Amino acid sequence: MTDIFRYWTPEFAEYYVAALNDDAGFQKAARKFEDVITLVCLDTPDGKDVCQTLHIDRGRVRQDLEVEDAPGAMRARPFDKKVTMARTTTPYAIWCRLDRGQMNVAQALVSPDYKVEGPKLKIARSLGVLNALSAVASKLPKSY
């Protein structure tokens, strides 16, 4: 039986990356994708801020993970478009609503607490990969 990890913990992050590397749907969506996406979760139940940077190379994913006491210095870090295609930053509660299907991305985008940085046209062209990332996370067993 698979352990159940809480969403946005280091254990869940490792589990998520392994699942991405094993998921046929994600592999198909990302087969031509070579870029970096950063996901930032603020104020987890442990009082942490978490920054998960996903390096995607034609479907293969590796991550850099940073965890800081909230509010972490990462909140003030400038977005580096030379290194990262997109960065999404939002509080834990919104990540959970998105993951549970209680909110869609269009609803999140109008929230003042949901921030997306990066070239909008390039992000729009990558929606298939972004949706596949979300689909894998949503179907993984987890606790909140």
Image (cartoon, rainbow, N blue to C red):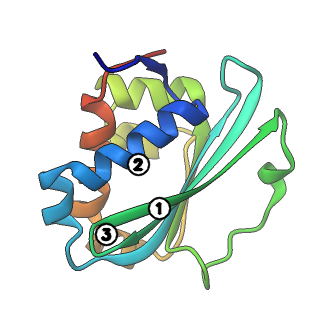
* Viewer-side residue, 81 vs 24: 24
Q: Are marks 1 and 2 in contact (CB under 8 Å)?
A: yes
Q: Residue at x 76, y 67 (%)?
A: 78
Q: Is residue 124 left or right of residue 95?
A: left
**Spatial distance from mark 3 to mark 2, Cα to Cα?**
23 Å
Helix, strand or loop for disc 3: helix
User: Amino acid under label 1?
Assistant: Arg
| Secondary-structure class at tag 2 | helix
Q: CA distance from mark 1 to mark 3?
A: 23 Å
Report the front residue among 132 and 61.
61
Q: Which mark is residue 124?
A: 3
- The amino acid type found where label 2 is placed reads Val
Q: Position of residue 91 (x, y in %)?
A: 62, 32
Closest to the observer, 72 or 115:
72
| First of labels 1, 2 by sequence position | 2
* Image: 60 above or below 33: above
The label on residue 17 is: 2
Q: Is residue 90 above or below residue 24?
A: above
Q: How far, Cα to Cα, is label 1 from label 2?
A: 7 Å
What residue is pinned by disc 1? 62
Mark 3 vs 2: CB contact within 8 A: no
Q: In this rendering, which labeled residue sits more in front, label 1 or label 3?
A: 1
Q: Farthest front residue?
A: 1
Q: Position of residue 105 (x, y in %)?
A: 35, 43
Do the numbered discs 1 and 3 sit on residues whose CB atoms are within 8 Å? no
- In the rendered image, residue 127, in percent from the top left (x then y), is placed at 27, 62
